[in-house]
Image (cartoon, grey):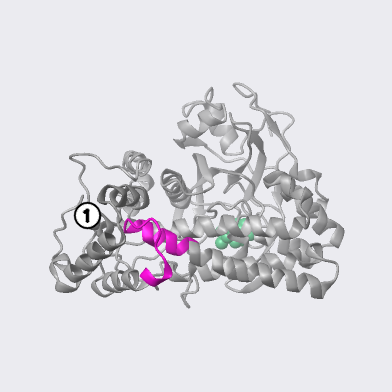
């Protein structure tokens, strides 16, 4: 592979490969025929002082497609396992490779990873590649998540490869650069616990704690404290998803980041009409990862993490289990508290309590019965969107609004405080499925502008402005039979 000189060398190091070799494989990406940058995240590039690079340069295309590397770089693929739809499997980076760890202007370290960059020893039967649609979809969705201020991996660039990728239909390939606080997953710990020695599990634990919460190393029980740290981040993350109507779609334990970021944008989507059991993923036949199941699944995944940490919590297994169980009970409570608080904020109540839950239940039941749009309904309540839909004329809706107003008054909540909470909690824009599909169809035809506009709008999703056109058009029939796909 020819070596490449950077416009300016960003600060990079690799700490992950200080772990035992069982955790990774040094491997280079496979060069591609004709790399061209089609999306370049200027704002993110600037955060990492990559701003000397630009979309037009051949160097950028070569490096971010993994086709040509600077001297001294030692890329690697990570080993991990995971519970996929409840079944334990050995996995690993089958189509991603970490190019290095880079520091942002604040001095925080992030993994930069090529996705779709060719086979590794963990590829199993896969080709190590990704389609242009799948990578641009990840770029759009992850940037929308960042815009919503929800913890997420980011996307720095998408480079098309000039090579075909064979899926159900042939599409051009692309390589995405993913930026993450780390790529350590629940599945990384499951791998260490199930397949490696206690020393190796301990090494991973020390590495992870040092990277994400070094202060916990001096806690009375570091493993238990770290478990709590990861749990609380997941509580925050999944509560955010529930707030904006996001369905991750494939919450396998290998797709849950210990850093608490949304990761693995495969079959994810935002829902239009509210439906608790909403599923978009074509392979989620049992609705395991349905919208309303996400908090339960997060707890299931965290129980898998807990299990893998048991030997580090206490050498006495019984004692470890007892401590772990107590933490899992707390987890359930943290989820409840966080969820109830979030529900309250969506309707302008700063301190919603359990006794107010029937009010929320009635609203959600009404939305579900009427297939009301999840995003627009809260804008109607806030009073910024005057709906055209007749469902907002029905007596059940009007009665509910009356109950809500009365309860607000009873609790002494000032109108301006309620509005201010609702503005922060309810997005006025989400990248709706039909918009994403139109953008991707354009990208496949070589037209990037529709996707660029969508990304731009997604960067400002809480906009409240005089004259703003609230209440995005929802397609006839809502989400219809909209389907999403994993790993395309
Ligand atoms: P995901 O469903 O994206 O979380 O992927 C599950 C596993 O399959 C991971 O180990 C991926 O690295 C691997 N994988 C997905 N797509 C491919 C591909 N095209 N080639 C090789 N491995 C893949
Ligand atoms: Mg994955």
Horizontal side of 391 relative to 269 (left or right) equals left
- For image coordinates 75% across by 73% down, the residue present is 321
Q: Is residue 182 magenta?
A: no
**Where is residue 151 drawn, in percent x and y?**
51, 48
**Residue 333 falls in image quadrant:** bottom right
Work out whether residue 245 can be spotted. Answer: no
Is 292 or 352 nearer to us in this picture? 352
Q: How many marks?
A: 1
**Regarding mark 1 in the picture, which secondary structure is present there?**
loop
**Residue 311 falls in image quadrant:** bottom right
Residue bearing mark 1: 473
- For image coordinates 40% across by 59% down, the residue present is 351
- For image coordinates 72% across by 45% down, the residue present is 215
Please determine whether, in this image, residue 44 is positioned above or below residue 83. above
Work out whether residue 210 can be spotted. Answer: yes
Is 58 or 88 nearer to us in this picture? 88
The quadrant in which the N terminus is found is top right
Span shown in magenta:
338-356
Q: Is residue 351 magenta?
A: yes
Q: Residues within 10 Å of mark 1 (few under 14, many from 20)?
A: few
Is 68 or 332 nearer to us in this picture? 332
Please determine whether, in this image, residue 270 is positioned above or below residue 9. below
**Where is residue 5 drawn, in percent x and y?**
65, 23
Is 65 or 145 nearer to us in this picture? 145
Predominant secondary structure, magenta span? helix
Horizontal side of 158 relative to 412 (left or right) equals right
Ligand 1 location (quadrant): bottom right
């Amino acid at each position: 592979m020819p070596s490449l000189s950077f416009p300016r060398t960003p600060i990079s190091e690799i700490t992950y490969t200080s772990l035992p070799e069982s955790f990774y494989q040094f491997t280079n990406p496979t060069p591609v025929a004709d790399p061209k940058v089609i999306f370049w995240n200027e704002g993110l590039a600037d955060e990492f002082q990559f701003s000397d690079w630009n979309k037009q340069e051949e160097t950028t295309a070569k490096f971010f497609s993994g086709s040509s590397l600077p001297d001294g770089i030692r890329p690697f693929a990570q080993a991990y396992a995971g519970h996929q739809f409840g079944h334990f499997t050995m996995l690993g980076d089958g189509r991603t490779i970490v190019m290095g760890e880079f520091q942002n202007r604040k001095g925080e370290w992030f993994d930069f990873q090529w996705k779709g960059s060719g086979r590794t020893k963990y590829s199993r039967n896969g080709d190590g590649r990704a389609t242009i649609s799948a990578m641009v979809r990840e770029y759009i969705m992850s940037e929308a998540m960042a815009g919503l201020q929800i913890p997420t991996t980011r996307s720095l660039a998408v480079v098309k490869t000039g090579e075909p990728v064979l899926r159900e239909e042939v599409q051009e390939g692309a390589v995405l650069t993913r930026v993450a606080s780390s790529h350590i997953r629940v599945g990384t710990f499951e791998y260490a616990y199930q397949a490696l020695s206690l020393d190796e599990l301990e090494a991973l634990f020390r590495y992870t704690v040092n990277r994400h919460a070094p202060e916990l190393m001096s806690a009375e029980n570091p493993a238990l404290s770290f478990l709590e740290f990861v749990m609380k981040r997941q509580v925050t993350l999944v509560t955010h998803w529930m707030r904006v109507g996001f369905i991750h779609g494939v919450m396998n334990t290998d797709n849950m980041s210990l850093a608490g970021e949304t990761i693995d944008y495969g079959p994810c989507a935002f829902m239009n009409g509210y439906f608790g059991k909403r599923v978009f993923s074509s392979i989620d036949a049992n609705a395991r990862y349905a919208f309303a199941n996400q908090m339960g699944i997060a707890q299931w995944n965290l129980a898998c993490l807990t299990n893998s940490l048991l030997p580090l919590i206490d050498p006495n297994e019984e004692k470890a289990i007892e401590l772990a169980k107590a933490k899992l009970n707390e987890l359930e409570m943290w989820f409840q508290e966080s969820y109830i608080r979030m529900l309250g904020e969506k309707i302008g109540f700063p301190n919603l309590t359990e006794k107010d839950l029937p009010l929320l239940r009635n609203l959600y039941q009404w939305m579900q019965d009427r297939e009301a749009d999840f995003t627009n309904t809260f804008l109607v309540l806030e009073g910024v969107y005057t709906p055209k839909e007749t469902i907002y004329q029905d007596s059940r809706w009007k009665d509910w609004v009356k109950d809500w107003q009365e309860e607000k008054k009873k609790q002494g909540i000032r109108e301006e405080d309620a509005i201010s909470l609702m503005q922060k909690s309810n997005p006025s824009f989400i990248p709706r499925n039909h918009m994403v599909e139109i953008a991707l169809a354009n990208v496949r035809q070589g037209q990037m502008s529709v996707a660029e506009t969508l990304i731009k709008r997604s960067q400002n999703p809480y906009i409240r402005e005089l004259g703003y056109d609230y209440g995005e058009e929802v397609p006839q029939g809502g989400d219809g039979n909209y389907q999403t796909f994993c790993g395309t």
